[in-house]
Image (spheres, rainbow, N blue to C red):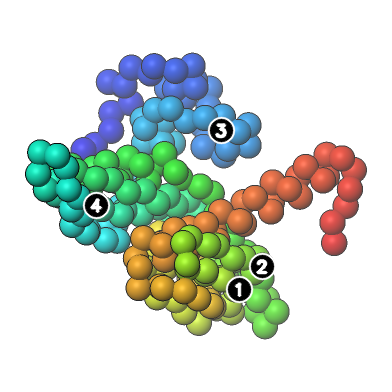
Amino acid sequence: MNFDIEEWEPRTSLGQKVKEGQITSIDEIFEEGLPIMELEIIDALLPDLEEEVIDVNLVQRMHKSGRKVNFRVIVAVGNKDGYVGLGQGKAREVGPAIRKAVDDAKFNIIKVRRGCGDWGCACGREHTIPFKVTGKSGSVRVTLLPAPGGVGLAIGDVGKTILRLAGIEDIWSRTKGQTQTTINFAKATFNALKQLSRIKAAEKDLKRLGVTTA
């Protein structure tokens, strides 16, 4: 569904500022730490997001009225230029579950810090990550390491999807745990990318306090 900003009626002051053009970049929202309560804010500021279904799983549970069956879907969204999100949704039918997962992924969107952090590469392009990071989910642990240009995404298919949507072209990786558990592998990869932003935020806080980092 195409988003029409003229038909959008914002329900929050942040949404109103976006519609009126007072805020033109999602970075402004991230830097201020403002909560995003409307999906239309994401649609307006990141109009070129792509969606990719990572996993569709049938979930059954017993209820007093009988067996209940739902579909659980994991979706990643990204613009292949530094922004990526991961979400999941459940519903009795696949279509509604995908839509819920896409909405959840948009609400979870993050900015990924990219760079040229491999010692053997000095191209200056933002094709990999600036330093090693690790993410965890359940028993799965994913470590991402900077790689020189041309290596590609040396990680499993689930990780490749998330990294590609984030705009990362080259990566080395190490994984531990039950990586065949798709949801944990996806979350661990996404959590590793989150660490890049958290470390950058910590560096900013130190600079405000007058502390310099090497």
Q: Quarter-wise, where is residue 148 in the image?
A: bottom right
Spot occupied by residue 198 in the image (x, y as percentages of width and height):
65, 50
Which amino acid type corresponds to the residue marked 4 in the rendered image? Answer: Arg
Q: Name the residue under label 2.
A: 131
Q: Which mark is residue 29?
A: 3
- Quadrant occupied by the N terminus: top left
- Distance Cα–Cα, label 3 vs label 4: 30 Å
Which tag, 3 or 2, sits closer to the chain's start?
A: 3
List the residue tagged with mark 1: 146
Say which residue appears at 31% left-offset and 21% top-offset.
8
Q: Which amino acid does label 3 sit on?
A: Ile
Q: Position of residue 191 (x, y in %)?
A: 52, 57
Label 3, label 2: how far apart the Cα atoms are: 25 Å
Name the residue located 53 percent from the left edge and 78 percent from the top edge.
174
Instruction: Measure how far apart labels 1 and 2 are at the Cα level.
Output: 6 Å
Labelled disc at residue 72? 4
